[in-house]
Amino acid sequence: MTSTASLSPVANTASRKRIHSSTLLLVCTAKEKEIFFSSPDARSFVEQCPWFDTHKSNATTDWSAAIHSLRPEVIVSCWSTPRLPDDATDYGIKYVCHTTGAVRYVVPRAFLERGGIVTNWGGLAAPQVAEHALLLALAALRNQPRWRGVAAALQAGSPHPVIQVETRTLMGRRVGLHGFGHIARELVRLLQPFGVHIAAYSKGVPPHLMRERGVVACQSLGEAMTGAEVFFECEALTVDSIGSVGAAQLGLLPDGAVFVNVGRGGVLDEGVLFQEAANGRLRVAVDVTSSDRSIADSPLLKLPQVIVSPHIGGPTQDRFAAFGEQALRNLEHYRQGEPLEALVTLEIYDRST
């Protein structure tokens, strides 16, 4: 960890202005610095930043000491950043520029309640998560888990592999969505060329936002799930949504339906989903599980017919630099007193995961 001070001016190719002049502390691992701040200007910036190396430092003792002694005004955080104390504003911290998505692991709600400012990557990752959701749905429809076994057993006179694999198409399907945030809206856009009929439900989302995109706005989750041949779980994990998808809701999906989860595992009863996948009634593909930080513990991994991706929905590795660039823009906006991109309000915080 280096000592902190008011930072030297750093050139930015786009604006040729100083990014900031306030006291700042970069809190991440060396690898996170490398992948998020890979452009020449970004590297030049972070090389001059006071840096708290979360890989080498003790996350409880050293982190607490750093906050108390260094008293940074701005913290640039990432996946590995330890959680701020509730009284972080008392030590002069005014702004947390979070390079990644979920802020709850780093920023307590009290920080926002006491006037702290927080930004994250906002909707920048949504296109990649939606792309991954589409990939999972197509893989489940084409029954990807059976490909290798069928290919290995092919011989003259055997049924056509399409018949053995039992492939299906997405074209013209009835699609259901739970959630209508950035990811779901991007997914609607990606689904349009397939000529699908889309119905969605998300508590608190104005129906007109769905109708404007050609989506049927449902009055309940059950309505969105009834008859859906492909169903996407995209809802944030909130007090209202936790455990909202159980046996009754999954039972509304027709036999052979595809269930895709790119939201949060805690939204549904994973035990019921396990049974629906085990008995073959539903085709299941998930990027998250009820143990979101340890997917290896999920019972779904025991079922070879279930597609489980290791929480890689987004962003893709080739997009990391764009998130670092947004963070640098926000630092410059903060210094200039200009509006920030992807500002996290209390409402967004409560719906974020």
Image (cartoon, helix red, strand yellow):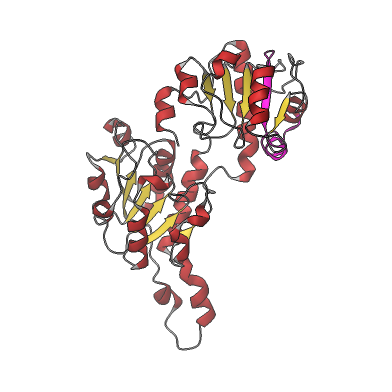
In the picture provided, is 269 more to the left or to the right than 94?
left
Is any atom of residue 309 visible in this view? no
Query: Where residue 42 appears, x then y in whole percent?
Result: 72, 29
User: Nearest the camera: 108 or 130?
Assistant: 108
User: Nearest the camera: 179 or 151?
Assistant: 179
Magenta region: which residues? 19-40
- Location of residue 166 (image quadrant): bottom left
- Location of residue 71 (image quadrant): top right
Query: Where residue 102 appears, x then y in whole percent?
Result: 51, 35
Residue at position x 59%, y 45% in the image:
316
User: Nearest the camera: 155 or 10?
Assistant: 10
Residue 215 within the segment the image draws in magenta? no
How many marks do you count on the picture?
0
- Location of residue 27 (image quadrant): top right
Look at the picture and state if 24 lies above or below 181. above
Query: Where residue 320 appears, x then y in whole percent?
Result: 63, 38
Residue at position x 53%, y 25% in the image:
119
Look at the picture and state if 326 lies above or below 132. above
Kindly give the residue lying farthest to the front in the view shown. Answer: 61
The quarter of the picture where the N terminus appears is top right
Is any atom of residue 57 visible in this view? yes
Query: Where residue 116 appears, x then y in whole percent?
Result: 52, 17
Residue at position x 44%, y 58% in the image:
138
Kindly give the residue lying farthest to the bottom in the view shown. Answer: 157
Residue at position x 61%, y 11% in the image:
336
